């Protein structure tokens, strides 16, 4: 029996060594992918500026709501319309939108208040209601907590010069305020987007999109069945990227990085949001979710150190993993994405990685999520069921 236990212990150590080496490779490749992506800026043709319709689904009043929404009204772009859509006529965001309409009288802005529901994902219902008023054949979808610069439209539209491109999406950095938000969001640019850059480099493109920005041609949206086709999915942004690739269109990751504004939140809200995201990723890309085990070098190297009784090999593995992890986080988050959180709070990453690993483990079990104050059930194929 002792021999069997020793055999399992040795096998466990070898497994941890493999995971540590895989993580170091991932960190190194993420550094390369970041440099490769941002070293070759996407061309900007100042003569290419087709008219676009911006669809903004809104539910509730976000912090800094006026500044976020108004940033889309300050674009150096010749022709665009903005459609704000809400479900509830008593929604507090309506007052903010009306103020924006008043302050930008020369812009084509419209507010749609409609309780029409086409599925369990109310955000998609908002988008579908807004789409009924679009005047142009290119739609730009962006969440209400996103803030952009005045050059946003001119830059993100550029990949559509290629007629094979059906969707364009953007990475984002967080303008977090408060310790809970900072601790939660530092992983976005240093963990999540590093995986995105690696995927983009390895696969010569991506097959999904982010709610921070989704640019989609009207004909592409119609080809996948319209908003009705994704009305019951939690990861509507993922589907708006994935489904067009199944119809033969390309998804392009723009090199324009938008800001995601999130202020102080409660710890419970942060945990619920993280669990929702992990379960969403699990059902959307199950193999990719499982493969994340090869990226948690911070944790596996710590486990290796403990499993080897703080041996030289254990300490060497931990030092190499942690140093390459921090270098990767700095290159991707601070240098490439210019994330102020990554620049200032890089030192909390080891603890954040440990928490991320625990949440990743929790993501394998359970199917219940909380979203916008509602408790819902997630099916194995990613659809939402009302309680």
Image (cartoon, rainbow, N blue to C red):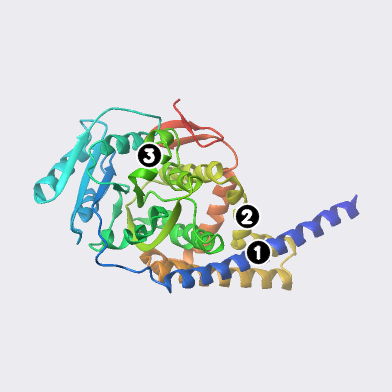
Where is residue 2 shown, x and y percent of the image? 89, 53
Circle 1 Cα neighbour tier, 10 Å, few/some/many (<14 / 14–19 / ≥20): some
Nearer to us in this view, 253 or 276:
253
List the residue tagged with mark 3. 222
Circle 2 Cα neighbour tier, 10 Å, few/some/many (<14 / 14–19 / ≥20): some
* Residue in the image at 17% along x and 41% along y: 110
The answer to which of marks 1 and 2 sits earlier in the sequence is 1
Where is residue 58 shown, x and y percent of the image? 28, 40
Circle 3 Cα neighbour tier, 10 Å, few/some/many (<14 / 14–19 / ≥20): few
Residue 128 seen in render: yes
Nearer to us in this view, 381 or 185:
381
How far apart marks 1 and 3 lie (CA) works out to 41 Å
Check residue 321 in the rendering and tell me which mark sits there, or answer none. Answer: none
Nearer to us in this view, 165 or 298:
165
Q: Quadrant of the C terminus?
A: top left
Which of the 4 quarters of the picture holds residue 148? bottom left
How far apart marks 2 and 3 lie (CA) works out to 37 Å
Q: Residue furthest top?
A: 387
List the residue tagged with mark 1. 22
**Pointers 2 and 3 in contact (C-beta within 8 Å):** no
* Residue in the image at 36% along x and 44% along y: 219
The answer to which of marks 1 and 3 sits earlier in the sequence is 1
List the residue tagged with mark 2. 293
């Amino acid at each position: 029996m002792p021999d069997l236990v020793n055999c399992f212990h040795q096998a466990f150590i070898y497994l941890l060594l493999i995971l540590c080496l895989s993580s170091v490779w991932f960190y190194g490749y993420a550094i390369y992918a970041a440099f490769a992506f941002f070293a070759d800026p996407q061309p900007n043709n100042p003569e290419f500026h087709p008219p676009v319709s911006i669809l903004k689904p809104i539910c509730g009043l976000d912090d800094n709501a006026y500044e976020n929404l108004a940033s889309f009204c300050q674009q150096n772009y010749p022709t665009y319309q903005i459609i704000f859509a809400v479900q509830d006529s008593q929604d507090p965001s309506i007052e903010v939108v009306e103020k924006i309409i008043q302050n930008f009288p020369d812009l084509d802005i419209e507010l749609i208040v409609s309780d029409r529901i086409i599925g369990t994902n109310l955000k998609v219902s908002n988008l579908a209601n807004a789409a009924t008023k679009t005047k142009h054949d290119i739609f730009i979808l962006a969440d209400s907590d996103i803030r952009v610069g005045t050059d946003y439209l001119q830059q993100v539209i550029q990949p559509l010069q290629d007629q094979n491109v059906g969707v364009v999406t953007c990475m984002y950095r967080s303008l977090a305020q408060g310790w809970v938000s900072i601790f939660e969001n530092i992983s976005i640019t240093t963990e999540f987007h590093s995986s995105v850059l690696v995927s983009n480099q390895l696969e010569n493109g991506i097959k999904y999109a982010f709610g921070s920005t989704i640019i989609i041609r009207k004909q592409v949206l119609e080809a996948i069945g319209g908003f009705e086709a994704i009305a019951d999915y939690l990861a509507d942004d993922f589907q708006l990227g994935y489904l067009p690739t199944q119809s033969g269109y390309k998804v392009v990751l723009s090199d324009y990085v938008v800001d995601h504004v999130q202020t102080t939140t409660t710890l419970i809200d942060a945990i619920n949001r993280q669990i929702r995201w992990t379960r969403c990723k699990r059902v959307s890309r199950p193999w990719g979710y499982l493969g994340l085990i090869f990226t948690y070098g911070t944790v596996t190297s710590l486990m290796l150190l403990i499993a080897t009784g703080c041996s030289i090999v254990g300490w060497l593995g931990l030092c190499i993993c942690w140093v390459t992890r921090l270098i990767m986080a700095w290159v991707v988050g601070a240098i490439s994405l210019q994330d102020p959180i990554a620049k200032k709070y890089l030192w909390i990453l080891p603890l954040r990685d440990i928490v991320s690993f625990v949440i990743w483990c929790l993501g394998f079990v359970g199917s219940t999520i909380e979203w916008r104050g509602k408790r819902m059930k997630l099916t194995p194929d990613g659809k939402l069921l009302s309680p």
